[in-house]
Image (cartoon, grey):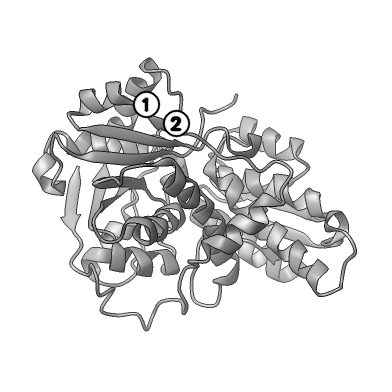
Amino acid sequence: MKVIANPWRGSGLPRTEDLAEGTVSTNAAAAAKLYATCPKANTTPLLERPDLATAFDVSALHLKDERPRMGLGSFKALGAAYTIAKRADAQISRGKANTHETALSGVTFACASAGNHGMSLAAGAPLFGAKAVVFIAETVPEAFAERLRAKGADVIRAGTTYEEGMAEAKRRSADKGWHLLPDSTWPGETDAARDVMEGYLIMGTEIAIQMAEPPTHIFLQAGVGGLAAAATVSARATWGDDPIIVIVEPDAAPALQASIEEGRAVLTDGPVSNMGRLDCKDPSHLALKRLAADADYFMTIRDEDATECVHFLSTNGLQTTPSGAAGVAGLFAACRSPDQVKLTPKSRVLCYLSEGPEDG
């Protein structure tokens, strides 16, 4: 475990000229309004687990359980599908379509995915008459490719990493006129992923109602940083500056932590992590800017920490993956050196179970 205190807390990064322009969305009301129109909209539970709190030697532990979200098994059901729905709604509002079901007929959306972002795209596109193309690395299990195809998506394997898949998705989309829908941001590409993160605000809106007492600590898993940034926006809007927010990444892919240390966005490298959904070497620029201003600590954990935590949660009735458990794994690791993140027996902790177990 490596933990650094955020030197840019409150001020943001000292250099932003090389970053994508803009900010993450804070329009939770708009996200909630659009989400309410979805036939499969559901509120996921906030689990209070005093037994696990005792095991971690904290006062309370709450887990936002995203495993049942819209039947897709992940918080990312709120991302690509929400973004596509927003575009369909805009077509209706402009008088360019008569029904949501046909609002995006003839449109093809493409993305690169290490998992659930692609599933959200695959599920969301056909609801509005569009097609989905998902680029996955050669290392992604075929069982997941079959799940994407079962939703009607075309699956294209490209490269051995998420980054190589993204490069091919960008190239092919430009050649064929497809609409690229990434879950990350970079110069010249911000609108789609900004809407993806806007969809994630729905989780924070739910938590604000579900959680009677504010947390003292929030541990957030991060890949490119979309979930972490949206959850941070929601937490600051609901509880202000009091909660200590800890961003947790694999030590094989410390894109956010390394960027915070350098004071600018940096591309990292490293081996493949078992936290595959979080194994992203390049941070989302808008997410990075928000987290630099509002997060308190950046932590990296080992694959072994995530594996140990998955086993621990499973024995306590909570099945998930190393990626889905990474925030809890950060708490797990922090308990060994609690002073590093100001953790005490009186702490009230919020974490996210961001996805269910693998199928197949």
Residue placed farthest to the front in the image?
Answer: 212
**What's under tag 2, amino acid-wise?**
Thr
Asked whether, in this view, residue 121 is left or right of residue 229, the answer is right
Question: CB atoms at circles 2 and 1 under 8 Å apart?
Answer: yes
| Residue 322 on image: x %, y % | 40, 33
Q: Residue visible at 64% across and 66% down? A: 171
| Residue 328 on image: x %, y % | 32, 36
Asked whether, in this view, residue 278 is left or right of residue 173, the answer is left
Residue placed farthest to the bottom in the image?
Answer: 17
- Where does label 1 land, which residue? 310
Residue placed farthest to the left in the image?
Answer: 339
Asked whether, in this view, residue 277 is left or right of residue 288, the answer is right
* Cα gap from disc 2 to disc 1, whole angstroms: 6 Å
Residue closer to the observer: 319 or 234: 234
Residue closer to the observer: 119 or 74: 74
CA neighbours of label 1 inside 10 A, class few (<14), some (14 to 19), many (20+): many
Q: In the image, is residue 347 above or below residue 192? A: above
